[in-house]
Amino acid sequence: MTSVFSESSDLSLDKHVNVVSAKSFFQLRQLRRIRRSLDDDSVATLVHAFITSQVDYCSSLLIGAPKKTDKLQCVLNSAARRIVSNTRKFDRGLTHFRRSQLHWLDVVVVDRVRFRVCVQVFRCLHKMAPEYLSTYCQPVSGISGRRHLQSADRDHLDFPRVKLASYGVCSFAYAGPSNWNSLPAHLRDNSLSLSSLKSHLKTFLFSFY
């Protein structure tokens, strides 16, 4: 299924969230019709292909905008409830099932978005991302005149001050380095592979639930 980013004229991302939610619920209705004919593994694969991939598409742009993720969280809840676990709306234990069995991070608390942003920073630092993004991920220790700062000793990344809190904090130039700097040192270890970083980062984020 092709994913298309829909930008709002006011840069609020409301249009994108609405489009993704509508497409995802449509796919859920289609999957629900054939649910009884599929085993659990097949259903989980289809949900990932048609639902979670849609929710995650361009989700890094939602960093700093938690109120806009409510609809996307509803999509994941519905997918976990009606399709994967085959339970009813008000059955208990849905949150536990979504986190412990499906290993899905929450969107509404922006952990799912934060995960993708930090993974993108890792790619930038290891020359696995486009140069135009990598330029925003510069270690403080590598900037002339700032090597004496404590942030340089902590292997932090440099990020600009933002004037517009509503939009500036959502930019990758700010959100990427600032979220990366907030991670514990063992997650910012240069020796980690991408797969190890993803695994340890998800474990770290789940520890707050």
Image (cartoon, helix red, strand yellow):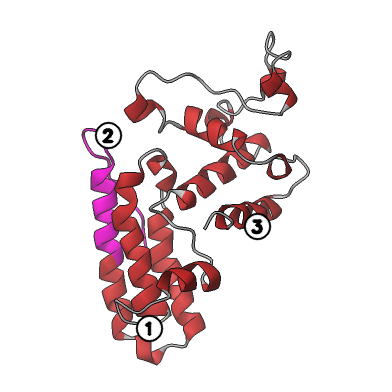
User: Pointer 2 and pointer 3: residues touching (CB < 8 Å)?
Assistant: no
Element carrying mark 3:
helix
Q: Is 103 rendered above or below residue 68?
A: below
Q: Residue 119 in the image: state x and y as whole percent.
A: 58, 45
Q: Residue at x 56, y 31 (%)?
A: 177
Q: Is residue 207 magenta?
A: no
Q: Position of residue 65 (x, y in %)?
A: 35, 40
The three-letter amino acid code for the residue at tag 3 is Ser
Q: Which residues are magenta?
A: 1-24
In the picture provided, is 26 more to the left or to the right than 45?
Answer: left
Q: Position of residue 58 (x, y in %)?
A: 41, 47
Task: Indicate the quadrant where residue 106 lies.
Answer: bottom left
Residue 46: quarter of image: bottom left
Q: Earlier in the sequence, mark 2 or mark 3?
A: 2
Question: Which residue is located at x 67 percent, y 15 percent?
Answer: 143
Question: N-terminal of the two: label 1 or label 2?
Answer: 2
Q: Can you tell which mark lies on residue 11?
A: 2
